[in-house]
Image (cartoon, rainbow, N blue to C red):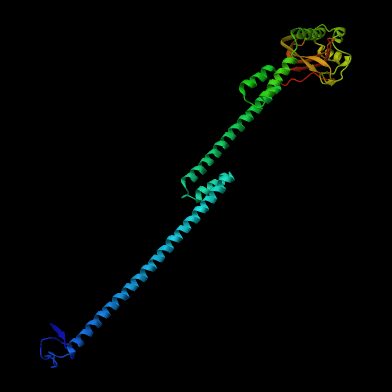
Amino acid sequence: MLIHCPECNHQVSDKAATCPNCGIQIAGNPDITSSNTPKHRKSDSKSSGKGNKSSRWAIIFFCILTLVFAAGVGSYYLHTQMQKQDEEEAFKQAVESNNADELQRYLAHYGAAPQVHRDSVKSMLQHMRDAERDKEEQDQLDAIDSIDYALAQKINTIDAYEKYLREHPTSKRAGEAKARILQLASNNATEEEVDFARSVCRRFFQAINSHDTDQLLSTVPSTMTRFLNRVGATNSDVITFMEKLYKPDVNNLNFRIMDPFSAKHATDEGGSEVLRAQFTVTLNIDRKDLSQERFSTYNVTADITQDGLISRFNLKKIVAQAAEYSE
């Protein structure tokens, strides 16, 4: 086999007598084996050292890589947990606030929040919008309700309140309207009382038609609660009213009571129980000056006492720009 010459390190056969390069004895030289074997071992040892050194660096690199990976995973997990905790706290605060602005801010800042949380917040917002819309609609209905009830109060009749209840059956004022109907029903005069009030008022206007002072004064007390615009009016005020109607050119007056004629129980300004009549009269005037007014219509309100006297009287023209008779 070929070996290395211990002197010049050239390859030479172990059977050769001498090295052809340097001439050193080869065959039978005891140093041949020893000189070649250490070198072989040295080379192996060197190669083995290099391998061990590479392995150690690989292990170190792997360990470092593992630590870096573990640190990254841990950091990500910690960050994720903190984000989750922050989102849960924000969700709790938004829900407990019951405030639309807070709920909107939550949705804007936590787009990746659990779907169940986002759905819950959206549901709350929708409920708030519906409630706000319902409130606006209810406010409008309440405004209409108030206007209609004020109108019924102004008219203050059973028909007016019944009409209001038909249009607003669930109104919070329904109970009050029903109470007013009962009160008006209980205040309504009987048919006999209505006829009694009509007869007293008819005598009053017949006295004016006939220009009869005595008959006129027989229909009123000596002092009236109110006559036209005068409080505590006397018989003199009533006579003056009639005389003003009979102007110099007037030949005759004809007051006529028209239907409907209504009467109800009431309390006058002095606290006495009276029948309060409401009706319309027409007036035809026979006069010389045909250019002057000859026909007019009036609304009348009169309080009739139990002894058949008119204690309160008011007369108002129906035509536009007409004024009450007054002193």
Image quadrant for the C terminus? top right
| Residue 20 sits above or below residue 143 on the image | below
Left-right relation of 256 to 30: right
Q: Is residue 130 above or below residue 214?
A: below
Q: Position of residue 181 (x, y in %)?
A: 70, 18
- The quadrant of the picture occupied by the N terminus is bottom left
Farthest residue to the bottom: give it.
23
- Compared to residue 209, the image places residue 164 above or below, namely below
**Residue 270 figure quarter:** top right
Residue at (72% x, 10% y) in the render: 258
- Tell me where residue 136 appears, x and y as whole percent: 59, 35
What residue appears at the point 18 percent right and 86 percent down from the top-left corner? 33
Q: How many marks?
A: 0
Q: Residue sitting at 71 percent across and 20 percent down?
A: 180
Q: Nearer the viewer, residue 212 or 215?
A: 215
- Residue 289: x, y in percent? 76, 11
Pick whichever, 95 or 312, lies toward us. 95
Q: Is residue 190 visible?
A: yes
Q: Position of residue 26 (x, y in %)?
A: 13, 90
Residue 155 in view (yes/no): no
Where residue 216 sits, quadrant-wise, is top right
> What residue is drawn where x is 20% and y is 87%?
34
Using the image as rendered, state which of residue 75 and residue 256 is in the foreground: 75
Q: Nearer the viewer, residue 190 or 207?
A: 190
Residue 199 occupies quadrant: top right
From the viewer's perspective, tell me whether residue 66 is left or right of residue 197: left
